[in-house]
Amino acid sequence: MNDSIKILTLLFLSLQVYSACPCLEQKNIITSPDRNVSVLVGISENKNAFYTVKHGDKLLIGQSRLDIIREDEDFSENFSLDSASNIQVIKDDYEILAGKKKRCSYLGNRKTFHFSNKNGEVLFFFLSVYTGKIPGIQITFYQRDKIGNLNNRW
């Protein structure tokens, strides 16, 4: 086999390995608007959904599972990540009745991840990453009810 065929074969195999690893896909990363906080969402080798959180280069939360086990459905294993939405900017200004600061605001980025389990049931994870004096993340789980509405009441 000549050198150019070996190089093309190696390049092709490298691209296949890169594309097969969800932890390397940029679409599975969401950052705060100031880019200080980042959250990686993926599927482990054991087919468990997980997330990690970093602040700058410092790992704050290591690989943690995203699980829900209900009486009627198991969302704890054999997951697949079907899709991820584009980033949606979220911003709100509001007033509170008590506290040092009456007027509050926040700015964040939100992404929706669609996971399905071994039975084909779909679970939506809304992941928001906020910026500010106290940065934070919010994870909300939803599933469609029998008429197609998003529901997080189980």
Image: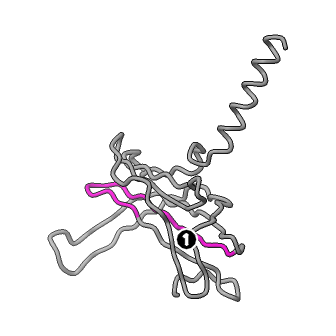
Q: For the stretch drawn in magenta, what is the main secondary structure? A: strand
Residue at screen point 54% across, 83% down: 70
x then y, percent, for residue 107: 39, 59
The correct choice, above or below, for 36 with respect to 9 in the image is: below
Residue 128 among those drawn in magenta = yes
Residue 78 among those drawn in magenta = no
Highlighted range, magenta:
121-137
Residue toward you, 62 or 102 = 62
Kind of residue sitting beneath label 1: Ser
Label 1 sits on a secondary structure element that is loop
Residue at screen point 69% across, 88% down: 146
Q: Disc 1 designates what residue? A: 76
Furthest-top residue in view?
2
Q: Is 37 displayed left or right of 88 in the figure?
A: left
Q: Quadrant of residue 104?
A: bottom left
Q: Quadrant of residue 143?
A: bottom right
x then y, percent, for residue 109: 47, 57
Residue toward you, 5 or 112 = 5
Residue at screen point 50% across, 60% down: 110
x then y, percent, for residue 25: 60, 45
Give the crowd class for mark 1: few <14, some 14-19, many >=20 residues within 10 Å: some
Residue at screen point 69% across, 70% down: 118
Q: Is 81 displayed left or right of 53 in the figure?
A: right
x then y, percent, for residue 68: 51, 75
Residue toward you, 24 or 79 = 79
